[in-house]
Amino acid sequence: NAGVTQTPKFRVLKTGQSMTLLCAQDMNHEYMYWYRQDPGMGLRLIHYSVGEGTTAKGEVPDGYNVSRLKKQNFLLGLESAAPSQTSVYFCASGLGQGARDTGELFFGEGSRLTVL
Amino acid sequence: ELKVEQNPLFLSMQEGKNYTIYCNYSTTSDRLYWYRQDPGKSLESLFVLLSNGAVKQEGRLMASLDTKARLSTLHITAAVHDLSATYFCAVDAGSGTYKYIFGTGTRLKVLA
């Protein structure tokens, strides 16, 4: 039972390079999220999606783009990486807040990104 | 803009002691979530509080929600070393947004 899978788990980039983080979930969840975690800052929401083909900005969206072309996948892109984007990135998914779901999120294992 | 504040940020306590972690949030919300994160690991769901006055308990942890005060508490009873972790609360920014905002976390260290 895979749950939420993130790839890659580790990556080192040079300033100005681009990359994409992939999040895949096999729970048929509607909602998907990208957070970044930095020491002393907790988790901050970058972008999220409430369904296939939709995306919305979170608290810290600048410098990132996302796409949700398939329900099970949520991609996070960095077009021109900066040292300030060095962080641990977490993907999460949730079924929704319908009658049969509580809104809790299920997290991937995280992706550690270093930008030199 | 929704703000979620936790205190304390760091907590070092002796085994067997009791303590409470507080989570305050700035806008109306009737849903609040608690998560646990072990060092270097992912987050796992602890409690889901869905209405004013909700109380959930599991083992030595008990969570409660007061939506009028915009406050949730996570109470630790007779702490043990295995509870050492970082605890986060999270709030839905508004009905129907599904935009979950997290607090800064409380790093708990239980000393033997």
Image (cartoon, rainbow, N blue to C red):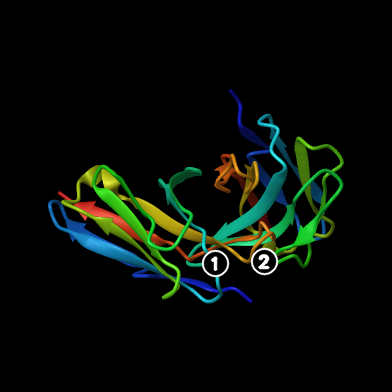
Residue A67 is tagged as: none
Q: Locate the N terminus of chain B and report the quarter of the image it occupies.
A: bottom right
Name the residue: 31% across, 57% down: B108
Circle 2 residue = A84
Relative to the observer, which residue lies in front, A57 or A10? A57
Image coordinates of residue A102 in percent, x first then y, are 55, 46
Image coordinates of residue A58 in percent, x first then y, are 70, 64
Image coordinates of residue A27 in percent, x first then y, are 66, 31
Judge if badges 1 and 2 mark residues of a common chain.
no
Q: Dot 1: few (<14), some (14–19), or many (≥20) neighbours within 10 Å? A: some
Circle 1 residue = B29
- Vertical comparison of B82 with A34: above or below: above
- Disc 2 marks a residue whose amino acid type is Ser
- Vertical comparison of A22 with B63: above or below: above
Res. A38 image quadrant: bottom right
Q: Specify the subunit that label 1 lies on.
A: B
Relative to the observer, which residue lies in front, B40 or A44? A44
- Disc 1 marks a residue whose amino acid type is Ser
Mark 1 lies on a secondary structure that is: loop
Image coordinates of residue A99 in percent, x first then y, are 60, 43
Name the residue: 43% across, 63% down: B52
- Vertical comparison of B29 with B41: above or below: below
Q: Dot 2: few (<14), some (14–19), or many (≥20) neighbours within 10 Å? A: few
Query: Residue farthest to the top?
Result: A1
